[in-house]
Image: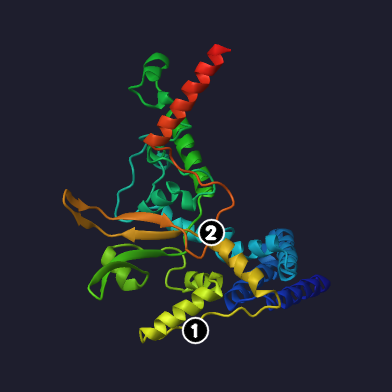
Amino acid sequence: MNGDVKSVLSLYRTCLRQIRRLPTEYLRQFFRLKIGDDVRAILDPRLKHLQPTKINRVQKDLRKLRAANGGISKCFDYILDTAYGRRGPLRWEILDPLRSEPGVPPPPRIISAVESSRPPVYSREMTALLTSDASRTTKALPSAALANPPSLPARANPESPEARALGPFSKRREVNIRWRFFQQELQRTRLPLQVAVNEPTVSGGVWSASRNTDVDALARAGVRPVGLQHSGVFEEIESLACPPSKLRHSADRASSAGLTEHPAPSLDSHLPVRFLRRRYQQLLARIPMLVFKPPSPKPSGTQPGRFEVALSPNAAKRSGPAHRIAGDTDLAWIRCAQAVKGSASKKK
């Protein structure tokens, strides 16, 4: 056992040497805590059954840290995704509050005698994330799919012709299909680190909207905090991803307005600054911005408040094609092309 303890402590010290080479204090603190928790679990005799799994995890993290410090972009992205909640336990801590809606009664049971048969709850924040391309790894869901998943047969509706012909659909199967669809779509959804509120401001007699993330703004809008709210982590990522020209322009604009500009966070690393900035720009493309627009008066009535999803202007452009829903003009061109193609095939 003594030899095992020495090998574990040696592994821990090797990890710490790699952690010291990470470029920001947040990354260093995060992985010190993460590796420390895993090593304490390995040395805890009450968790002896978890020791092989924990050792493999620490060894994997060490390999990723070495490769990231060696300038391997894929491994560096893995380190960033782990530290900023794109994967791993932190992602599920961010997700857990979004699976419920405070102040809203739970939906009725599908099976009246089984409490666990209630369908999943789509909170306002989660509805916005599921139905936006900016926060999805696949195509955004239409709003109707949340109430009736595409994998749910039409027979589940007791008024449908299928239900009249074949009999009622199994309630247990309906519960399973709804929860399976919910879990699958959550895995395909990227989560925000905080929520911002669009508040109108007046500057020089001109109205504009500013995004505020402080406690008072959320309280005025009646919005709950999300993820790493008030920690300054998202602002640090944006600053690290910002090109030097934008930083200089922002500093000049602040000095001309007589405002105090907070010093930008620095990168303390042996890796090229351009490589690190690109990694953080790619990270921003995987972190959606959740913005709440408060109710606003309209000629036809008051428009209710709603959540919208966007990406930071400093985020890297997505490599894949953007998904969007075809409009009336697009559909007209598609029908025209199909008609021309059909007439050409008939002539042949």
Q: Is residue 222 left or right of residue 246?
A: left
Residue drawn at 30 percent across, 51 percent down: 104
Image quadrant occupied by the C terminus: top right
What x and y, as percent, mark residue 113? 37, 36
Q: Is residue 25 above or below residue 303?
A: below
Q: Hey, which quadrant is residue 250 in on the image?
A: bottom left
Tell which of 302 and 214 is nearer to you.
302
Q: Which residue is mark 2?
A: 285
Q: Hey, which quadrant is residue 166 in on the image?
A: top left
Mark 1 neighbour density, 10 Å: few (under 14) some (14–19) many (20 or more): few
What x and y, as percent, mark residue 199? 29, 66
Q: Which residue is mark 1?
A: 263
Q: Hey, which quadrant is residue 82 in on the image?
A: bottom right
Q: Is residue 27 left or right of residue 73?
A: left
What x and y, as percent, mark residue 38? 66, 67
Q: Is residue 298 visible?
A: yes
Distance from Cα at disc 1 to Cα at disc 2: 24 Å
How is the rendered protein coloured? rainbow
Mark 2 neighbour density, 10 Å: few (under 14) some (14–19) many (20 or more): many
Tell which of 327 and 346 is nearer to you.
346
Q: Earlier in the sequence, mark 1 or mark 2?
A: 1
Q: Is residue 225 visible?
A: no
Tell which of 122 and 283 is nearer to you.
283
Q: Is residue 60 above or below residue 26?
A: above
What x and y, as percent, mark residue 106? 33, 47
Residue drawn at 51 percent across, 80 percent down: 264
Residue type of the residue flagged with mark 2 = Ala
Q: Secondary structure at mark 1?
A: loop
Q: Is residue 68 above or below residue 328?
A: below
